[in-house]
């Protein structure tokens, strides 16, 4: 079970919980609403638990979802900080910048936050 859980799916779940709906989360992550919906369905299937209770107009966290959200929000903050720390100890050439750019795209890390914290690194490919 744990080996099949995708970090990108977890990050999408956290953003949904933070922003309150799939549409806003999809916009923030730069993906389609249907993609985010598939990610959550896959995450729930992988875990064997309902994280979000959905109706046609709203969604809310289940009890398991609320607990999972609290733990994941903290864990993802540590992961983001670890990535940021890596920038502090290395001088990057253009190839490394491109590699990091692709890595960050894959994990959907907040580029606005990254740009505020890292001066002088152009993350545009």
Image: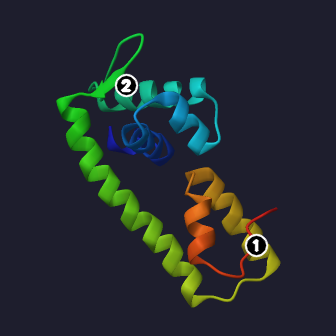
| Quarter placement of the N terminus | top left
**Measuring 41% from the left and 41% from the top, which residue is drawn there?**
5
Residue 106 image position (x, y, % from top left): 62, 51
> Dot 2: within a 10 Å radius of its alpha carbon, few (fewer than 14), some, or many (20 or more) residues?
few
Dividing the picture into quarters, in which one does residue 101 lie? bottom right
Residue 118 image position (x, y, % from top left): 61, 78
Q: Residue 109 bears which disc, if any? A: none
Give the tally of numbered discs.
2
- Farthest residue in the top direction? 56
**Measuring 56% from the left and 76% from the top, which residue is drawn there?**
117
Q: Nearer the viewer, residue 47 or 113?
A: 113
Circle 1: element type? loop
Residue 78 image position (x, y, % from top left): 37, 67
Q: Is residue 79 left or right of residue 23?
A: left
Q: Is residue 67 above or below residue 45?
A: below
Q: Is residue 41 above or below residue 6?
A: above
Mark 2 lies on residue = 45
> Dot 1: within a 10 Å radius of its alpha carbon, few (fewer than 14), some, or many (20 or more) residues?
few
Q: Looking at the image, is mark 1 or mark 2 earlier in the sequence? A: 2
Circle 2: element type? helix
Q: Nearer the viewer, residue 109 or 102?
A: 109
Dividing the picture into quarters, in which one does residue 75 lie? bottom left
Q: Which mark's residue is nearer the viewer, 1 or 2?
A: 1
**Measuring 62% from the left and 60% from the top, which residue is drawn there?**
111
Q: Is residue 125 above or below residue 87?
A: above
Disc 1 to disc 2: CB gap under 8 Å: no
Between the C-alphas of marks 1 and 2, the distance is: 38 Å
Mark 1 lies on residue = 122
| Quarter placement of the C terminus | bottom right
Residue 39 image position (x, y, % from top left): 49, 31
């Amino acid at each position: 079970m744990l080996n099949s859980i995708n970090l990108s799916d977890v990050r999408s779940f956290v953003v949904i919980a933070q922003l309150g709906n799939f549409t806003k989360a999809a916009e923030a992550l730069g993906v389609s609403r249907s993609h985010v919906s598939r990610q959550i369905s896959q995450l729930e299937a992988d875990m064997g638990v309902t994280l979000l209770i959905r109706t046609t107009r709203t969604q809310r966290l289940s009890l398991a979802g609320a607990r999972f959200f609290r733990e994941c929000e903290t864990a993802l903050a540590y992961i983001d900080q670890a990535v940021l720390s890596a920038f502090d100890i290395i001088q990057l050439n253009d190839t490394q910048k491109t590699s990091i750019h692709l890595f960050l795209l894959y994990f959907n890390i907040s580029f606005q936050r990254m740009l505020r914290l890292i001066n002088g690194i152009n993350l545009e490919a």
